[in-house]
Image (cartoon, rainbow, N blue to C red):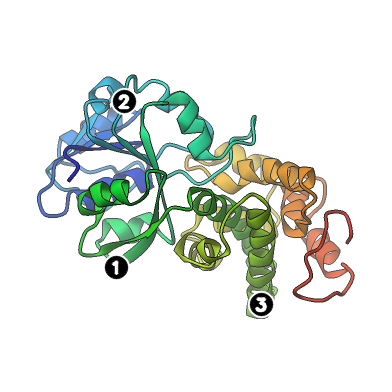
Amino acid sequence: MAGSLGVVGAGAWGTALAQMLATGGHNVLLWAREPEVISSINAGAGNPLYLPDRPLAPTIKATGSLDELAQCDTLLVVVPAQHLGATVAQITQFSGDMVLCAKGIEAGSGRLMAQVARAAAPEASLAVLSGPTFAHEVAAGLPTAVTLACEGGEPQWDRLCPALARPAFRLYYSQDVVGAEIGGAVKNVLAIACGVVDGLQLGQNARAALIARGYAEMLRFGLARGARAETLAGLCGLGDLVLTCSSVSSRNFALGKALGEGAVAAVLLADRRTVAEGAYTAPVLRSLGRDIGIAMPITDAVCELLGGHVDAGRTVTTLLSRPLRNEAEQVPEGSG
């Protein structure tokens, strides 16, 4: 069984994971960037900046030293996707289990998070934690189930499962790291689109249709990149997609809803303390899809909207005007 536990990133999700891991009196070391967050957690006042009104276990200790985190046996890395590489590179000579919890694709390189982490921490044993998870529910101890995809296969699962699983936090094993990452990254973009539908008050029929067609988009892209269909049909794909496309508790859905209500993308993105990862993933996802000839019309529409090129109403009109076709057809990019 893995020993000491560390969480890198004290946003809402990182703090919630630390609280979950502390269940039963386990000690957890939590790295935060902001001095005020460190002071508040260590004073027993919780994390009002990112997870307000949630008392935290006294066995959680906050620190601003990544060197201190490097001494842990197992690290959960929960920093935003676009900062993961730079952060992990500062955790020098780490050779334990590193569990990646960020959902996204690196904008400058098109790399998935495991590829980013592998370059920054070549000695670490990597795994990916992904699935339908709202931070406030995990912190409250409500029942949650997730995928834990292990590069190291069953031996790594045998180490991590007893270290991370809790009575209300159920893990399911996978060795499909690519599938787990693609599911988590693509669903963020699709959640923005579903938020737009909600903001425009287009109804539940439209949202359900968008989820289904978005899942088809996720599946086309994922299979082309080597993911397994059963992974994308599971917790880290379809499960996460349904959750984040259904509630303003999702930052990506909330961003899309605001856009549907007429807000300006540039203003929303500049003003948000918490990161809507889908806004950064969408352009690189579109580029990757085009490179391999995969049609991703919903992703294209989200990119146009985020770029300020069209308004929300026009975006939906464009999607509705696409040619009618066989639902199961695998459509090449650019064919309508």
The label nearer to you, 1 versus 3, is 1
How many numbered circles does the render carry? 3
Is the residue marked by circle 3 packed among few (<14), some (14-19), or many (20+) residues within 10 Å?
A: few
Task: Please state if 47 lies on the left or on the right of 27 as rendered.
Answer: right
Q: Are marks 2 and 1 in contact (CB under 8 Å)?
A: no
Residue type highlighted by circle 3: Gly
Q: Describe the element under mark 1 as helix, strand or loop.
A: loop
Q: Describe the element under mark 3 as helix, strand or loop.
A: loop
Residue bearing mark 2: 94
Residue type highlighted by circle 2: Phe
Indicate which disc, 2 or 3, sits on the residue closer to the N terminus. 2
The quadrant the C terminus occupies is bottom right
Query: Mark 2 to mark 3: distance in Å?
Result: 49 Å
**Residue ranking furthest to the left:** 25
Where residue 166 appears, x then y in whole percent?
21, 59
Residue 199 visible, this angle: no
Where residue 133 appears, x then y in whole percent?
40, 59
Task: Please state if 92 lies on the left or on the right of 263 as rendered.
Answer: left
Residue bearing mark 1: 143
Residue bearing mark 3: 203
Where residue 244 appears, x then y in whole percent?
52, 62
The label nearer to you, 2 versus 1, is 2
Residue drawn at the location 13% of the way across and 46% of the way down: 26
Residue drawn at the location 24% of the way across and 62% of the way down: 141
Is the residue marked by circle 1 packed among few (<14), some (14-19), or many (20+) residues within 10 Å?
A: few
Q: Nearer the viewer, residue 37 or 18?
A: 18
Q: Are marks 1 and 3 in contact (CB under 8 Å)?
A: no
Indicate which disc, 1 or 3, sits on the residue closer to the N terminus. 1
Query: Mark 2 to mark 1: distance in Å?
Result: 32 Å
Residue 301 visible, this angle: yes
Q: Quadrant of residue 257?
A: bottom right
